[in-house]
Image (cartoon, rainbow, N blue to C red):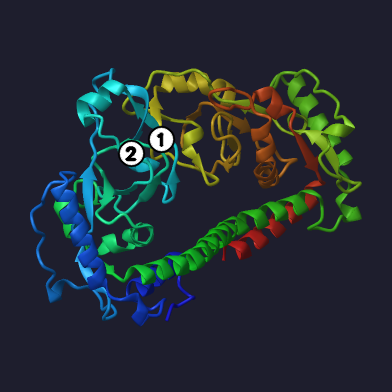
């Protein structure tokens, strides 16, 4: 009985186990026995030896009772793989000889094996390599190949003549019968797990001896074909199940993030909170911000900046409540960036935080490089980070903001700095960047490494509610995200 509650991979293994123990098909008297088939194979082998087409090989050991991994029907027979097929191991021409490579003759490596018809290879060798290393003994089309080193049991059928490497064996069957070939092709990957494998440096592997000694449960030819037909019926359904299971698993992994993004979207549209008259409006808040900005300019604490472009209707991504306003980020807070130069690093000193040190909303100081206090002071004249400020990677991993919660001295490189102020809730801005970061990535520049410029960041749109509603929005999101995490 096959347990359909198992994973697709385990169901596949169960189906193959059932097939190899005779449980998927009926054993019919008119099929004869595997003994008859083995006799035919032996006679054909003798004829090939007499004709000089193959060499006589050393007899393989008899199969002992304690070797047999599971029971099979009485008219089947356990045989050694080397008794039904001649296994030919490939070669790899010297990589140091340029005359051997980049030719038009297909050469198969394990990564080419596709569990189906193989019609292309990633590499090709030259006629000289064919002559020097393979004596022009190319493997004909229609031959089955199987990997047996490091990645055991990957198979393919050649759709063209080709050579292959030493991690692959090609199968030259003594009896040229399509039912036998299809049967072995369908089942060999499952049967390799019963082979006498050994540990290699990088994983499990077989060798020519263990390949030849590998045991195969052999039914009569007619039943082999029925098994192949049954597997052709069942295994595609398992593949479809696996594909759907993988999709479902991916949906399960993506679900929390998709819900989080949906909640952020609703919050930034004003759908998670009520708009209260006593909150006032974003216009009132903007006037306060402008008045504070003028005061700081007059006192010489900040410089007057160039006016930002007006917001056009086609820039606005969605509608917001009537008492909110779309604004550019630099209109409501000071947006700077760290150094883009590469200062001299020292063994101990001031941590230099870069994009790679900002992860999952936190600053990770564990693998920071260090700079001198003098270099840090030069950087921090322009972009000193205080607790509650927002940091955001500008190069490589764009977005992924973090709120600084560490009062240690450090400097920033290739990181945007969004200064905290009393008119704006930093966690509200943090949530907006978390929602808007995909748009930032799409609008980034750079052929080798993507980056977002300080100008683009300053001109970034943000929906601005009154401060009281900002607080309610953040509180609501914190509560919902906590439930989502649980």
Tell me: residue 94, above or below residue 469: above
Q: Residues within 10 Å of mark 2 (few under 14, many from 20)?
A: many
* Number of dots carrying numbers: 2
Q: Can residue 401 be seen at all in this image of the molecule?
A: yes
Marks 1 and 2 close (CB-CB < 8 Å):
yes
Image position, residue 34 (x, y; %): 26, 72
Above or below 185: residue 290: above
Q: Residue at x 25, y 47 (%)?
A: 149
Left or right, residue 184 beside residue 198 = right
Residue at label 2?
Answer: 109
Q: Residues within 10 Å of mark 1 (few under 14, many from 20)?
A: some
Q: Earlier in the sequence, mark 1 or mark 2?
A: 2
Instruction: Write down the quadrant of residue 124 in the picture.
Output: top left
Q: Residue at x 56, y 32 (%)?
A: 385
Q: Secondary structure at mark 1?
A: loop
Residue 450 shown left or right of residue 182 in the figure: right
Residue pointed to by mark 1: 121
Q: Percent x, y for residue 85?
A: 23, 54
Q: Which of 39 and 85 lies nearest the eye of the viewer?
A: 39
- Residue sitting at x 37%, y 80%: 28
Position of residue 473 relative to residue 241, above or below, is: above
216 and 366: which is toward the camera: 216
Across and down, in percent, residue 173 comes to 27, 53
């Amino acid at each position: 009985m096959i347990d359909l509650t198992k994973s697709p991979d385990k169901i596949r293994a169960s189906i193959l186990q059932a097939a190899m123990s005779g449980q998927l098909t009926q054993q019919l008297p008119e099929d004869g026995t595997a003994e008859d088939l083995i006799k035919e194979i032996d006679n054909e082998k003798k004829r090939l030896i007499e004709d000089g087409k193959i060499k006589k090989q050393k007899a393989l050991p008899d199969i002992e009772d304690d070797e047999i991994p599971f029971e099979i029907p009485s008219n089947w027979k356990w045989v050694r793989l080397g008794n039904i097929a001649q296994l030919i191991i490939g070669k790899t021409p010297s990589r140091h000889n340029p005359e051997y490579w980049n030719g038009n003759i297909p050469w198969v490596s394990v990564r080419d094996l596709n569990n189906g018809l193989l019609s292309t290879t990633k590499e090709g060798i030259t006629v000289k390599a064919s002559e020097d290393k393979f004596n022009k003994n190319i493997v004909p089309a229609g031959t089955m190949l199987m990997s047996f080193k490091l990645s055991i049991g990957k198979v393919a059928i050649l759709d063209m003549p080709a050579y292959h490497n030493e991690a692959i064996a090609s199968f030259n069957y003594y009896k040229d019968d399509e039912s036998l070939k299809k049967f072995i092709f369908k089942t060999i990957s499952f049967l390799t797990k019963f082979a006498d494998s050994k540990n290699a440096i990088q994983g499990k592997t077989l060798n020519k001896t263990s390949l030849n000694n590998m045991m195969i449960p052999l039914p009569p030819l007619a039943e082999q074909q029925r098994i192949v037909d049954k597997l052709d019926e069942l295994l595609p359904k398992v593949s479809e199940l696996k594909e759907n299971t993988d999709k479902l698993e991916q949906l399960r992994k993506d679900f929390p993030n998709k819900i989080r993004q949906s909640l952020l979207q609703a919050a930034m549209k004003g759908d998670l909170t009520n708009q209260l008259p006593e909150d006032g409006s974003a216009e009132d808040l903007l006037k306060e911000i402008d008045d504070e900005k003028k005061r700081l300019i007059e006192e010489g604490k900040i410089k007057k900046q160039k006016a930002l472009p007006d917001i056009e209707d086609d820039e606005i991504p969605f509608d917001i409540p009537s008492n909110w306003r779309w604004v550019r980020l630099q209109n409501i807070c000071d947006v700077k960036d760290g150094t883009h130069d590469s200062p001299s690093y020292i063994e101990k000193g001031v941590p230099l935080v870069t994009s790679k040190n900002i992860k999952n909303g936190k600053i990770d100081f564990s693998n920071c490089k260090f700079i001198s206090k003098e270099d840090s002071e030069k950087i921090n004249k322009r972009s000193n980070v205080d607790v509650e400020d927002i940091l955001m990677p500008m190069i490589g991993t764009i977005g992924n903001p973090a709120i600084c919660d560490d009062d240690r001295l450090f400097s920033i490189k290739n990181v945007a700095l969004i200064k905290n102020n009393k008119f704006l809730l930093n966690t509200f801005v943090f949530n907006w960047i978390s929602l808007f970061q995909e748009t930032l990535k799409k609008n980034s520049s750079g052929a080798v490494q993507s980056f977002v410029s300080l100008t683009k960041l300053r001109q970034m749109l943000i929906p601005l509610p009154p401060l009281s509603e900002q607080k309610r929005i953040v509180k609501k999101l914190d509560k919902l995200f906590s439930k989502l995490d649980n």
